[in-house]
Amino acid sequence: MSRITIATAALLLAFPAAAQDQTATETGERVEVNGMQMYYEVSGQGDPIVVLHGAYMNIPSMGEIVPMLAENHTVYALEFQGHGRTTDIDRPITYPNLADDVAAFMDAVDLQKADVLGYSMGAAAGLQLAIRHSEKVDQLIAASAAYDAEGWQPAFREFIPQMTVEMFTQMPFAEEYRQLAANPDGFPALVEKLIALEKEPMAWGPEVDALETPVLIITGDADVATLEHSVTMFRLLGGGGMGDMGQPLPASRLAVIPATSHTAVIMQPELLMSHIGPFLAGETPKGMFD
């Protein structure tokens, strides 16, 4: 595999460089969650929403979506195990573990229930949160997500067995990680856990089918999950039927962003908010028969 192909595949998992501000001053707090010191920030006013970042990311690298949400919501943005300013612990990173961490975080900050926005790894963690702790999730926005490993693009599935720690430690964000990390030397251990995460079994179709939580699926038309997979997930959640037939539209929604790769999804906050805002408010466009 060429160096260019390796770099491209590695960056598929990484945070968008243009969205990050690693010089951001620390304005948040820490709370003990399942043996780690979890870093989080609270901003804005209104109904609560929890923001979950992707792999190798942190709060600053989520970009402008956080302050935009804070215009009308109380935003709880947290950093996952070993990411950003949150400490690592002697435990694998799995989607159920991440979901349980979010549930424990909500308990720790006395947040009974909230909307949840997850991107990439955070979206899969959000799905598991809705599956494992449905009482804590009001509405879920899952951006660039999959519920089954078979839903990843073939090129990505073929690359997973070839991943090595060295591929990632040579990337620019390996050095940038040190600027915020609770353990500046912890990046190789984090990469090892995240590579193992890609190899974890992932087949949640029955659980997604049973969800009653409204879900907004957001995907790029050139995302890491195939379009067919996103449509299938939408159908599992009750969507995909015809409107204008006298029945209300389903609570869940699907938004496909054109000309957009995986890392480009989070780089379009205004476009994301044009879908997220109406979803959270329960607003739908009016048709001829409404």
Image: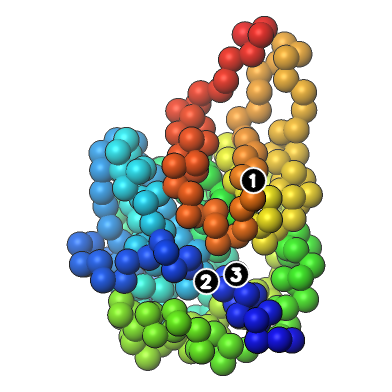
**Measured along the vertical axis of the image, is residue 182 above or below residue 97?**
below
Q: Are marks 3 and 2 in contact (CB under 8 Å)?
A: yes
Which corner quadrant of the image does residue 81 belong to? bottom left
Q: Image check: 99 left or right of 145?
A: left
Residue 269 % position (x, y): 44, 47
Chain-order first, disc 2 or disc 1: 2
Q: Nearer the viewer, residue 50 or 151?
A: 151
In front: label 2 or label 1: 1
| Numbered label attached to residue 12 | 3
**Circle 3: residue type:** Leu
The answer to whether residue 128 is visible is no
Image disc number at residue 14: 2
Distance from Cα at disc 3 to Cα at disc 1: 17 Å
The relative height of residue 109 versus residue 281 in the rendered view (above or below) is below
In the structure shown, which secondary structural element does the residue marked by tag 1 occupy? strand
Mark 3 and mark 2: Cα distance apart in space = 6 Å
Q: Quadrant of the N terminus?
A: bottom right
Q: Which mark is residue 73?
A: none
Query: Mark 1: which amino acid?
Result: Pro
Between the C-alphas of marks 2 and 1, the distance is: 21 Å
- What residue sits right under mark 1 in the picture? 258
Scheme of image coloration:
rainbow
Question: What type is the residue that disc 2 sits on?
Answer: Ala
Where in the figure is residue 135, as x and y percent of width and height? 49, 43
